[in-house]
Image: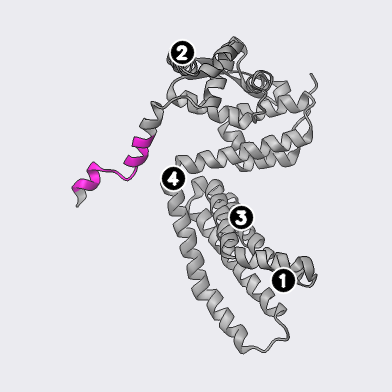
């Protein structure tokens, strides 16, 4: 009785699901945020990321949603973050700068290739690519 | 740039739901944007979203604990229903009161007490994640009460459109649906206060 319990801990199913999710495709917001972080370069923290999403994607995303997505991307190893010094105009709180890792860049390229291949197969959308 | 501090209520809520503790950079971003001229409506939408995401994340990362907290809370409600609500209902049957309203008000108070107890127990049992788990339990109670009373609520609402005196019955039913989950939150808050005073 005790043996099979030890072999199969209660959290196992959750761990399997987590592992499965790591290999999954990027969600649309994840891809958008990765691209925005790449565009912003050294200035990629919460506020400019949310602003750039609004300007480029015409999509109002809450700061909490931006951070939740970035944390998910960080867990997958696609972005890394670094805390800057606290500033008075932010109530003494530091900015958290994000940058895309090599693994993240690889994933963006892979997603681009997949989407491009899918795009090419749709004759009605060929002209809209540019 | 001149700094406009966030409203005290927003800071308190962000602290209470551990948003500041878990993500200080997000609170810094909110302060920066608010100082930059963002409206109060924008700020409160952001604060609510931040709280919802924090609770969601905490529940998601402690899934088994959340299930256990719900089971413990439900057990407390069942026990309270059996030990307090049922005898009180029997007692009310034996006492002659004029009209249904005093009886309803008394039973509502008893139910509110039991739900407060439920929230208090969840909060005491799961101290480290109390805010998220009490909130989850209260939300679940709201959904359960809404689902249980949906047909009655719809009937009363439809009747109240044509017969104004039905509005009182509708209000009384809605009071149960709204007040009981609020009492769960109150119970959680009371347990938190006691623990803070001791700690």
Q: Is residue B76 visible?
A: yes
Q: Which structural element holds mark 4?
A: helix
Which of pointers 1 and 4 indicates the residue nearer the eye? 1
Distance of label 3 from label 1 (alpha carbons): 25 Å
Q: Is residue B191 visible?
A: no
The location of residue A95, given as percent across then percent down, is 62, 20
Residue at mark 3: B185
Question: Horizontally, is A9 left or right of A98 in the view?
Answer: left
Which chain's residue wears label 2? A
Question: Which numbered disc flags the more N-terminal residue, 1 or 4?
Answer: 4
Distance of label 2 from label 3 (alpha carbons): 47 Å
Q: Residues within 10 Å of mark 3 (few under 14, many from 20)?
A: many
Label ID, residue B169: 1
Which of pointers 2 and 3 indicates the residue nearer the eye? 2
Which of pointers 3 and 1 indicates the residue nearer the eye? 1
Q: Which residues are magenta?
A: A3-17
State whether the magenta stretch is mostly helix, strand or loop: helix
Q: Are marks 4 and 2 in contact (CB under 8 Å)?
A: no
Distance of label 3 from label 4 (alpha carbons): 20 Å
Distance of label 4 from label 2 (alpha carbons): 34 Å
Q: Are marks 3 and 4 in contact (CB under 8 Å)?
A: no
Q: Nearer the viewer, residue A15 or B150?
A: B150
Label ID, residue B63: 4
Is residue B55 shown above or below B91? above
Q: Residues within 10 Å of mark 1 (few under 14, many from 20)?
A: some
Q: Which residue is painted at 45% across and 26% down in the image?
A: A75
Q: Residues within 10 Å of mark 2 (few under 14, many from 20)?
A: few
Q: Are marks 2 and 1 on the same chain?
A: no
Residue at mark 2: A109
Q: Which residue is painted at 60% across and 41% down in the image?
A: B52
């Amino acid at each position: 009785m005790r043996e099979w319990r030890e072999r199969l801990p209660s959290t196992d199913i959750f761990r399997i699901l987590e592992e499965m999710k790591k290999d999954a495709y990027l969600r649309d917001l994840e891809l958008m945020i990765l691209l925005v972080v790449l565009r912003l370069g050294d200035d990629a923290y919460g506020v400019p990321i949310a602003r750039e999403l609004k300007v480029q994607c015409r999509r109002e995303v809450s700061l909490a949603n931006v951070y939740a997505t970035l944390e998910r991307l960080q867990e997958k190893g696609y972005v890394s973050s670094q805390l800057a010094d606290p500033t008075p105009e932010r109530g003494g709180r530091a900015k958290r700068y994000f940058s895309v890792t090599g693994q993240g860049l690889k994933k963006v390229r892979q997603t681009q290739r997949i989407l491009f291949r899918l795009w090419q197969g749709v004759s009605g959308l060929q002209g809209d690519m540019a | 740039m001149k700094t406009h501090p966030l409203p005290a209520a927003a800071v308190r809520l962000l602290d209470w739901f551990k948003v500041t503790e878990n993500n200080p950079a997000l609170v810094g971003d909110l302060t920066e944007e608010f100082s930059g001229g963002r409206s109060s409506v924008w700020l409160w939408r952001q604060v609510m979203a931040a709280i919802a995401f924090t609770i969601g994340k905490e529940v998601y990362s402690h899934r088994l604990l959340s299930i256990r907290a719900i089971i413990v809370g439900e057990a407390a409600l069942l026990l309270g229903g059996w030990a307090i609500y049922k005898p009180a209902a029997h007692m009310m049957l034996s006492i002659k009161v004029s009209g249904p309203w005093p009886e309803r008000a008394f039973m509502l108070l008893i139910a509110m007490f039991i739900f407060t107890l439920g929230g208090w127990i969840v909060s005491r049992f799961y101290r480290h994640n109390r805010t998220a788990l009490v909130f989850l339990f209260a939300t679940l109670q709201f959904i359960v009460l809404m689902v249980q009373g949906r047909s009655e609520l719809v009937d009363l609402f439809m009747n109240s459109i044509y017969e104004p005196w039905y509005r009182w019955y509708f209000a009384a039913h809605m009071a149960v649906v709204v007040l009981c989950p609020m009492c769960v939150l109150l119970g959680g808050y009371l347990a938190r206060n006691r623990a803070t005073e001791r700690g």
